[in-house]
Amino acid sequence: MTLAVVTIVHGRHDHLALQEAGLLRSTRLPDVHVVVAMDDPAIADLAGRDPFPRRVIHVPRENGHLPLARARNIGAQTAIAGGATVLVFLDVDCIPGPGLVRAYEDAAIHPATSRDLLCGPVSYLPPPPPGGYPLDDLPSLGEPHAARPLPPPGTVERSREGYELFWSLSFAVASDTWFDIGGFDEAYLGYGGEDTDFALRAQAAGTVLAWVRDAEAFHQHHPVSSPPLEHVDDIVRNARLFHERWGTWPMGGWLDEFERRGLVRRGSDGSYELAATDESRDDQQWSGQP
């Protein structure tokens, strides 16, 4: 059994360093950490560093956009080509709890859940105190997301409902399940929509969601914009693509707020499109999390 952790990153090098510190404290170390750097040449190749190897793969922007879906696929392909049979995906903002890697591996090899889409709870951290986050105290600082399942410790909750609750901050699959789902749809460029599309692809493939309580991660604090004005172009384009695929509109709250602000207009057929505007939408660094 070979397990790879896959992280895609653009900036947030300090967050990546703390994620790696968390991995080093894991009760089960990964066999390899695959870091996919999107238009981020400052991330050095860390291959060969003990106690487990790290591989850094560099991918450019695509038509000016960060290729989130493609980056995750490249990370998975790299890991599988190296012999990985379990893939753990962690957002660069996530610090893994000590039991995360082991809990995901146990679920990925258990006969009842080995073909499931495995999701662990993510707790949000407040701004770090002076001196940074104390890794031993993260459970007391983190606030679990109220809208997502939180089974009792030591349990796994399986469901064929709630696929819209999936997010790519923290999840895992066996390599066979990855192939069943088909990876992420690379037609999505930039921010928004690719997570829910992946979940619906999993549902269409008959893959069960499994909420793995002990695969706990902690999301490092960073400033956010709500709605994410810097991503309006990506969100509208990806939402239109999602609607073509699935017949529904994702990210409805954001789209409606963009419309209220005059950034987006709705056509007579109910579709969303960008509106001409002078309002600034600075190209801020992608955060990986709304």
Image (cartoon, rainbow, N blue to C red):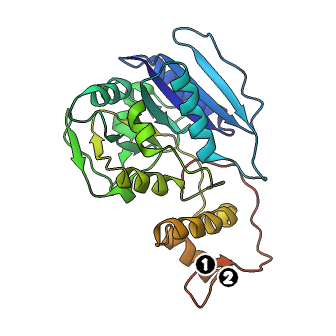
Q: Residue at x 63, y 37 (%)?
A: 9
- Is 151 situated above or below 147? above
Asked if residue 280 lies left or right of residue 180, the reply is right
Would you name the residue on which mark 1 appears?
A: 272
Q: Is residue 261 left or right of residue 163?
A: right
Q: Position of residue 56 (x, y in %)?
A: 66, 25
Label 1 to label 2: alpha-carbon separation: 12 Å
Q: Earlier in the sequence, mark 1 or mark 2?
A: 2
Judged from this view, the residue extending furthest toward the right is 278
Residue located at (69% from left, 48% from top): 66
Please tell me which residue is depicted at 59% across the width and 91% down the height of the picture.
268
Residue displayed at 48% across by 57% down: 197
Tell me where residue 216 appears, x and y as whole percent.
35, 35
Residue beneath disc 2: 262
- Circle 1 or circle 2, nearest the eye: 1
Instruction: Look at label 1 and name its amino acid.
Output: Tyr
**What percent of the width, then of the height, locates residue 183?**
50, 43
Asked whether residue 174 appears in the rendered view, the answer is no
Amino acid of disc 2: Gly
Crowd band around label 1 with a 10 angstrom C-alpha radius: few (<14), some (14–19), many (20+) = many
Quarter in which the N terminus is drawn: top left
Nearest the eye: 185 or 192:
185
